[in-house]
Image: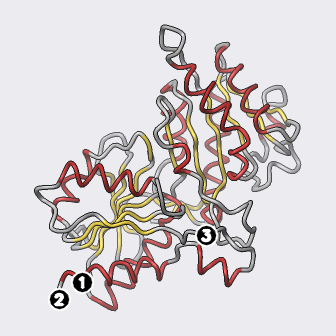
């Protein structure tokens, strides 16, 4: 069922709860103070309640993450807001060579509780430098954890777990998702419902009447609305039963809870918004292929955006950024090819 809160409201509420619970928690970023409350209003109200721990910074992403690293290494916790995820490229050195390496390079494991929030994704007409999904560039860094905001997952639970883990985390937030409604386990609409398939609440599984679909789409939180619309179209127009599996933790990838679904499906596709080449989707496909090789009917496929920059013109942007119809076409292509 729908929660009353939008995804952005739930995220804001989660930050308020975390600040109320932990006096060691700091928030840093550009233009995050009230009354502005950040470019997407995620931090609204925080600076009024916690003026000493919500710090508006100069425009220096590397400097912001550097200060957050210092806070974490001196016993505090820090959440950083990167105004647009594209700008995470400017703090890549601090994330790669300080945040992640500090966990283990001093001869004993240290806690480095830094969360770098990154609004990502297209479909907003923001153009080439404000619309990218850069998740793939952070995959494979030891002790760096990647999560993605989702309308299916409990944001407060996820952030609590991330901060308690002690490893730095990139937390990706697909911008169009902010205005969507959050969901709770159970019925979503007249066709679909969802539940969690692991105790940690990392894997959400959406299906029609709890059935095991012939097609399994594995995707991330930001793609949930498009994946669900594709599943609805395929069920109503093609009578193709689709299950959608959504993980919160992108990396390190945790495949065990989903292996049974992978083995049972006739077709498995991994859907992501990033560009092709060295991607999260390719990592997932490889891991699943290796784990389920003797039980897969067909190789695991991938669906992504085009190999191009994201245009500012909306009609051109839709041709580059993966859309619902792209997912539908990919499933239809797989099914048709394998039934000839």
In the visual, does 91 lie left or right of 231?
A: right
Percent x, y for residue 151? 51, 59
Residue at the far bottom: name it.
237
Residue at the far left: name it.
294
Residue 114, image quadrant? top right
Rounded to the nearest angstrom, the CA distance separating label 3 from label 2 is 32 Å
Contact flag, marks 1 and 2 (Cβ < 8 Å): yes
Q: Nearer the viewer, mark 3 or mark 2?
A: 3
* Label 2 crowd (10 A; few <14 / some 14-19 / many >=20): few
Q: Is residue 228 shown to the viewer in this render?
A: yes
**Element under disc 1:** helix
Residue at the far top: name it.
107
Mark 2, residue position: 340
Percent x, y for residue 130? 73, 60
Mark 1, residue position: 337
Rounded to the nearest angstrom, the CA distance separating label 1 from label 3 is 27 Å
Mark 3, residue position: 308
Marked residue nearer the N-terminal end (3 or 2):
3
**Element under disc 2:** loop
Q: Residue at x 56, y 47 (%)?
A: 137
Contact flag, marks 3 and 2 (Cβ < 8 Å): no
Percent x, y for residue 160? 53, 34
Q: Residue at x 56, y 27 (%)?
A: 100
Q: Nearer the viewer, mark 1 or mark 3?
A: 3
Q: How many marks?
A: 3
* Label 3 crowd (10 A; few <14 / some 14-19 / many >=20): few
Q: In the image shown, does 132 or 152 lie closer to the viewer?
A: 132
Rounded to the nearest angstrom, the CA distance separating label 1 from label 2 is 6 Å
In the visual, does 238 lie left or right of 20?
A: left
């Amino acid at each position: 069922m729908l929660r009353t809160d939008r995804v952005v409201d739930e995220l804001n509420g989660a930050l308020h709860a975390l600040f109320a619970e932990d006096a060691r928690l700091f928030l840093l970023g550009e233009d995050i103070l009230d009354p502005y409350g950040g470019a997407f209003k995620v931090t609204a109200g925080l600076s009024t309640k916690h003026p000493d721990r919500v710090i508006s910074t100069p425009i220096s992403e590397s400097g912001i993450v550097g200060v957050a690293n210092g806070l974490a290494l001196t016993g505090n916790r820090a959440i950083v807001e990167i105004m647009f995820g594209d700008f995470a490229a400017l703090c890549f050195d601090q994330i790669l060579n300080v945040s992640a390496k500090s966990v283990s390079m001093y001869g004993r494991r240290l806690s480095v509780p830094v969360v770098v929030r990154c609004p990502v994704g297209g479909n907003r007409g923001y153009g080439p430098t404000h619309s990218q999904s850069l998740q793939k560039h952070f995959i494979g860094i030891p002790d760096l954890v990647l999560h993605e905001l989702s309308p299916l997952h409990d944001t407060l639970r996820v952030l609590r777990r991330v901060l308690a883990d002690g490893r730095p985390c990139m937390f990706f937030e697909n911008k169009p998702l902010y205005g969507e409604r959050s969901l709770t386990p159970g019925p979503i609409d007249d066709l679909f419902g969802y539940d969690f398939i692991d105790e940690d609440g990392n894997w959400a599984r959406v299906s029609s009447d709890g059935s095991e679909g012939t097609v399994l789409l594995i995707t991330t939180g930001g793609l949930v609305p498009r994946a669900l619309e594709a599943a609805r179209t395929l069920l109503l127009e093609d009578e193709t039963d689709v299950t959608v599996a959504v993980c919160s933790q992108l990396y390190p990838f945790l495949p065990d809870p989903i292996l049974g679904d992978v083995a049972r499906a006739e077709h498995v596709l991994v859907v992501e918004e990033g560009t092709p080449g060295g991607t999260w989707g390719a990592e997932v496909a490889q891991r699943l292929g290796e784990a389920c090789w003797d039980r897969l009917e067909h190789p695991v496929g991938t669906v992504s955006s085009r190999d191009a920059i994201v245009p500012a013109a909306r009609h051109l942007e839709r041709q580059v950024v993966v859309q619902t119809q792209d997912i539908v076409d990919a499933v239809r292509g797989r099914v048709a090819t394998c039934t000839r």
